[in-house]
Image (cartoon, rainbow, N blue to C red):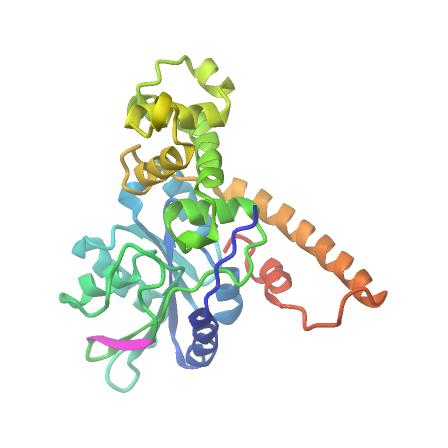
């Protein structure tokens, strides 16, 4: 299954960011700490290339702290980049990002050279919540579904500190299948863009290998780790359905409902603190995705040259992503 979701307003956001970044001093890219690689838009790296970047791993209170530390080390090792982890609703660490911006652009500040910061990220990553926390009042709309913010806005956090908020923007084309599943599990894509059962199967396959104790505790499975690892994913989803009452006539499990319950349990942290990827995992996924995408493009080129399909403008996203992303 290919998960794709790039509504019309995201095309407008892409154009707006390309124009705005010309006068920006620091870029804040908000990431979901549960899926930092997948929530880092490759196109964003291309659009903001050359600008100091602050990677904010938001929702860190929902993520695996050991894996969060590995991601922070990964990003902090990159040039002109700093990374911090926070919970956007907590005012103390949220204020820390202002100091981080001044460290990245030490020559900015004061009325003559005010700090100009662009904040961006995928949908539903928590930008609006963070902005409201920094501002101390409801400066931006918030919601638990993707695509709440639709237009750019400028917010003055101080007399010499301007924050430009932009709507959430996903990858123009998600060519890493694992990232598509993780983004869907987190709620970053619209509900009509994915099949809940397939996403739940991918989610439970990760959990039974890397977080078996959390899975056992939530659903009272009563299985040994070895037995759990060998249990088919569909059977585990069925167990979730029985435990949560997702039944239809005859006592059969409604797999669709069971899948929705598992995804919701992950999103609201009923399963515990979970991170769906490590830097090493994502690097491997990205390499495989780029290779498959290049092969797809070559097949398409041959068909076009043979006259089987009409010539068209090829998107830059995937090729540029390989050069600009590098798990940024």
From the top left corner, tell me how far across and down residue 156 is, in percent: 22, 76
Image location (x, y in percent) of residue 143: 26, 58
In the picture shown, does residue 64 fall above or below 235? below
117 displayed left or right of 49: left
In the image, 189 versus 137, the foreground residue is 189
Q: Is residue 73 among what the camera can see?
A: no
In the picture as drawn, the residue positioned furthest to the bottom comes out as: 112
Say if the magenta span includes residue 273.
Answer: no
Q: In which quarter of the image is the N terminus?
A: top right
User: x%, y% of residue 60?
Assistant: 30, 46
Q: Nearer the viewer, residue 242 or 174?
A: 242
Residue at image point 43% right, 42% down = 196
- Coordinates of residue 324 in the picture (x, y in percent): 57, 62
Q: Name above or below for residue 114 compared with residue 149.
A: below
Farthest right residue in view? 306
Secondary structure mostly seen in the magenta stretch: strand
Report the number of numbered marks. Answer: 0
Please identify the residue farthest to the front as the structure is shown: 249
The quarter of the picture where residue 30 lies is bottom left
Q: In the drawing, does residue 211 fall left or right of residue 91?
A: right
Per the rendered image, the range of residues in magenta is 152-157
Q: Height in image: 135 above or below 113? A: above
Residue drawn at (46%, 23%), measured in percent from left and top?
235
State whether residue 210 is above or below residue 59: above
| Residue 278 or residue 303, whichever sits in front | 303
* Residue 153 painted magenta: yes
The residue lying toward the viewer, choosing from 284 and 270, is 270
Determine the image quadrant of residue 136.
bottom left
Q: Which residue is drawn at 82% across and 61% down?
A: 302
Q: From this viewpoint, is residue 84 visible? A: yes
């Amino acid at each position: 299954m290919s998960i794709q979701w790039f509504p019309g307003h995201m095309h407008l956001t892409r154009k707006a960011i390309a124009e705005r970044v010309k006068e920006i001093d620091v870029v804040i890219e908000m990431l979901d700490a549960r899926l930092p690689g997948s929530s880092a838009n490759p196109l964003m790296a291309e659009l903001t290339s050359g600008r100091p970047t602050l990677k904010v791993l938001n929702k860190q209170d929902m993520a695996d702290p050991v894996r969060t530390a590995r991601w922070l080390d990964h990003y902090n090792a990159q040039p002109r980049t700093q990374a911090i982890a926070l919970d956007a609703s907590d005012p103390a660490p949220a204020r820390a990002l202002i100091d981080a911006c001044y460290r990245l652009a030490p020559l900015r500040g004061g009325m003559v050279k005010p700090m100009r910061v662009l904040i961006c990220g995928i949908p539903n990553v928590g930008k609006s919540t963070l902005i409201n926390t920094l501002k101390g009042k409801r400066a931006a709309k918030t919601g638990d579904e993707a695509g709440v913010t639709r237009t750019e806005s400028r917010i003055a956090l101080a007399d010499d500190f301007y924050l430009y908020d932009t709507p959430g923007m996903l990858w123009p084309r998600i060519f890493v299948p694992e990232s598509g599943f993780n983004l869907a599990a987190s709620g970053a894509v619209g509900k009509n863009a994915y099949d809940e059962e397939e996403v739940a199967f991918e989610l439970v396959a990760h959990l039974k290998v890397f977080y078996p104790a959390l899975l056992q505790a939530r659903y009272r499975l009563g299985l040994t780790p070895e037995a759990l690892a060998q249990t088919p994913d569909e059977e585990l989803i069925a167990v979730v359905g029985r435990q949560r009452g997702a039944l239809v006539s005859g006592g059969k499990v409604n797999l669709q409902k069971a899948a929705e319950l598992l995804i919701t349990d992950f999103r609201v942290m009923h399963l515990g603190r979970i991170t769906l990827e490590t830097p090493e995992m994502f690097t491997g996924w990205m390499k495989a995705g780029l290779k498959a995408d290049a092969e797809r493009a070559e097949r398409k080129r041959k068909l076009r040259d043979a006259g089987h399909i009409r010539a068209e403008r090829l998107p830059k996203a995937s090729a540029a992503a390989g050069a600009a992303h590098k798990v940024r």
